[in-house]
Amino acid sequence: MFVAGRKRKAQQVDAAAPGSRAQAPTGAAGSAPAIDDRQCARMELNRLLQLGADSTRERDYRVALDHFNRAAALAKNEGIEDARVYEARSRALFKVGDVGRAIDDAKHAIRANPGASGYTCLATILAETGKVASALKVIDDGLAAVDEQDPGFAYLKTLRMSAMYRLDPKCVLYLNLRTDPAMRLPPELVALVLCKLDVRALMRCRMVARHWRALIDTTPGLWSRPTYVSLTPEELLRRQMPGYEKLNAGLFYRRQEHRRLLNQMPDWALRYIFERSRAALTVLRIPETRPLTEATLSALFEHKRPRLATVDIDRRSGLTIPVVDRVLRWSISAQLAEIRVPYETHVDDAMVAAIASGAPKLRILDISGCVNVSVKSMFWAWNATLEDAQGSTALEELYLDDHPDVLELLVYSTRYRHFSGLRVLHIGTYLSTGITSYPRIDRLLDYYQRIPNRQVPFPALVELSICGTWGRLARWPRDHQVAPLISACRLLCPGLRRLSALDASYIGSTDLHEALRDCFPTLERLHLSDCRNLDTQMLTSLIGAQQALPLTSLDLSRCLGVDAHGLVELVSRCRQLVHVNLSRTSADNTVLAALTEAMGMDDAAGVEVLLLEVTSVTGAAVRDFAAACAKRCHRTRHSTHVRRAWRLRWLDIDNCRDVAADAVAVVRDLLLPMRTCSNSDAATEALGGGGDSEYDEEELYVVATLPAGTIGRARSAAQERGDGGPLYALIDMDSEQPFLELEGSIYQGVRDELLGTAMLFDISENAGDSGDAGGHDAGEADARL
């Protein structure tokens, strides 16, 4: 073995011999200060330790052990007692399996310097070899010998806890109190964090430790506003794009039914919430569950003076008619601001009168599907609570979906101002029991004609949902009188921001234009699906000369009257689009190119949901859009000027015949880092499943002519790799300029002709020469991939 110390001593003897070169005098002008032998030895020792540490980081423990052995020999010959040498060699010996020598070196390090690092090294080796009791003794000795101000003292305490956990995991719960956030933070802050959790998460937190359970059980505020179900991506998309019918069938529906069954709240959980909330219960939500027992109802009604602000009874709650009536009458108070009892058919006019008189601060009322409540009785009930017959209530949101008296609401609101303060109005028709016939239509229309000085019914309206209602009014037997009622009542007033009018197939072009003319410039959400009379000319006139529209959610699915030019004109003016549904429309590559261009303009907004089912887009345009999305996601993720990282959440290009299988694979790879949901999760086909049908019928042969020597190089690379043949990939088969990737090289081709089932290409290698056919260099071709 080479020993550095002996070699240096030999050099010193030679220097002192007669006839040797004399050394430069120390302290002479212009010369470096002299370095003694011990200082040189320490420099060499530090160098060897650094080399050993580098080898250890690279997990080359044999080379590291050689460096540490040389450092140990140098320290011994020079008389240097450095504990770092023995600690480092001890860890290297342990890694190569020499446990005995590793323990001896760790003990030597402790004798050389009784610091925290030596005790840590020895205790770690003993604990890893199963000698936990010996490791605990070493740690206790280290805690007694090391000063508390030493940085390694806290690590020794952590190591002691880990060793004790190896012996008995239960004992750590008692020793972990000082590091437990529930013990170190003030109870107010802990409660503030825990109140963000739903009921299931709170139940899990109760099982962490006893003091966690005591804290959660003794804080009624945690149970005052319980939430039960977390929304899935499918449910969120259903709320954002209700016209996306694919979520209502197939695997998505089965998955939602399975999740719905899992999210059913058991009876004991509701009883526990009612007991722990005590008098602090402010939100009463009864989700889908089995019929409540008497014990649960007794725990609820023990709140003698409820301070409820919200009552929400799910339509599948399983409550009987007497129980719902008792709960509603018990919960009505002056603080009540929200009542949601959708599709409870036993809610009648008497209950509405009790709500109007007992809850003067009511802001939200959802009585969708409550067919036993008449709109005329609602006007009478709130009229009794107002001092002035023309006064307005505090109601801001009204939900009357699937209610047969929607026409009465529209007509009466043009004369009486009881509900003129509404900001959200939902009067959609989703069930067959909605607006099908109205026997008093003649008298109602005559009454409407006799109203003097008809006023705008809801001047402060911000959100309006008339899904299905508008279309059913247009299909009325006397459509010449009922269909124009929407525009005549001026329901779509200026200032409207969110409009949902799905299934608007039979609306006349004149009525549609008059209704949308005033509110179109301020719309942020426009859902107008299956509208046959919406054409390009009308859309262009609605856009007018406006340079920018505030639309963020757009649904024009099955609007076949609008061509690609009109869609491009609309999309190019909307720079804040987030949700776009253009399924079964005339959308083509120009529309997708406009969306792709918008991806690189503003990082503050961008399309997150794009539905292009059954459209004329091609694989090349979809790839360009996916590449722009990937660049934008990377840019926003590393940007300090954007609040949250953007990503494409949903993409549907199903049944697009011009999107081939290779484009689908490339798009999937580009969108994989963003975890983009696609229709491939709900169907047995791949993303864009309809595009592969033309390749399933017959086999496709591709004939390519390559430069001389290309095949030879490819075969040589395959033989060196040991594979059966060269690796290749055909890209952009559906475009006029396909690409071939062969063994890492990219070749660009031009389609010449089609001979039966064989496609003939003339492909020449493009290595950056702009004179080649096609005019794209290899870098641009790789970017297209």
Image: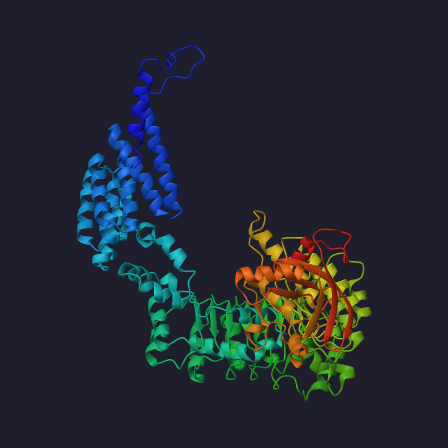
Which quarter of the figure is the N terminus placed in? Answer: top left
Q: Position of residue 390 (x, y in %)?
A: 65, 69
501, 603: nearer the viewer:
603
Q: Quadrant of the C terminus?
A: bottom right
* Residue at the front extreme of this rendering: 19
- Residue 577 visible in the picture: no
**Image position of 17 with respect to 159: above or below:** above
> How many discs appear?
0
Q: Is residue 445 above or below residue 332?
A: below
Expressed as whole percent of the image width and height from the top left, the position of residue 245 reads: 62, 77
Q: Position of residue 579 (x, y in %)?
A: 64, 65
- Quarter of image, res 501: bottom right
Residue 414 location (% of width, % of height) = 70, 73
Q: Taking 282 as reference, is 497 left or right?
A: right
- Up-down: is 495 above or below 514? above
- The residue at 73%/85% (across/down) is 476
Nearer-the-camera pick, 229 or 483: 229
Q: Nearer the viewer, residue 69 or 276?
A: 69
Quarter residue 117 falls in:
top left
Residue 613 visible in image = yes
**Residue, x 48% and y 76% (percent of image)?**
314
Q: Quadrant of residue 307?
A: bottom left
Left or right of 670? Residue 441 is right
421 on left or right of 127: right
Figure colour scheme = rainbow
